[in-house]
Amino acid sequence: MLLPTDGVYGLCCALEEAATVRLYELKGRAQHQPTAIIAASLDTLVALIPELDTSLVLPGPFTSIVPNPAHRFRLLAGDPPDASGVRLPELPPETQRVLAALGAVVATSANDPGGVPAATLDEVPARIRAGCGAEIDAGRLPGAPSTVVDLTGPEPVVLRRGAGLYLP
């Protein structure tokens, strides 16, 4: 499904292996590349990842890369599966309703790998749109993806500058 997030349109699916494999195929994403979980609440994340250090979860326009000692959601964690990406964004009401029903989704930007993130549904590549079972149109979004911050080491490391930080 295509869902509006706090920055760009996301290609999303349920936290199920078959759905995740299909998402990777549709995106054209390498199977070993990490993908984030967007959750409806911090409680939802803790239910999914009981050992989660909640102090590491940055709310808003950030993807927090956190330790994954139990190697949960191996398809999403990359190789090795020692870390996971989690998000608690401020979402449009339409997406909040979807997450209220599902709790959490696998999410990546709805663009070709390395391509420009989609700020509108019309900017989502046709092959991705054609392969989705559902889409929600919330109009034009800000167009900046989340800032990705690796919080697995002694100091935070910004892996991608995005909406959470000034973009030059």
Image (spheres, rainbow, N blue to C red):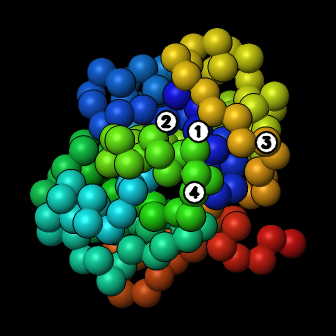
Mark 3 or mark 2: whose residue is earlier in sequence? 2
CB atoms of marks 3 and 2 within 8 Å:
no
Residue 118: x and y in percent read 75, 40
Quadrant in which the C terminus is drawn: bottom right
Mark 4 residue element: loop
List the residue tagged with mark 3: 139
Whole-number angstrom distance, CA of label 3 to CA of label 2: 18 Å
* Extreme-bottom residue of the structure: 154
List the residue tagged with mark 1: 3
Mark 3 residue element: loop
Along the line of sight, the residue nearer the viewer: 122 or 30: 122
Residue 131: x and y in percent read 57, 14
Number of other residues with Cα within 10 Å of mark 4, as a class: few under 14, some 14 to 19, many 20 or more: some
Residue 105: x and y in percent read 39, 42
Q: Which mark is residue 91?
A: 4
Kindly tell me whether residue 106 is visible in this rendering.
yes
Kindly tell me whether residue 35 is visible in this rendering.
no
The answer to whether 106 is drawn above or below residue 112 in the figure is: below
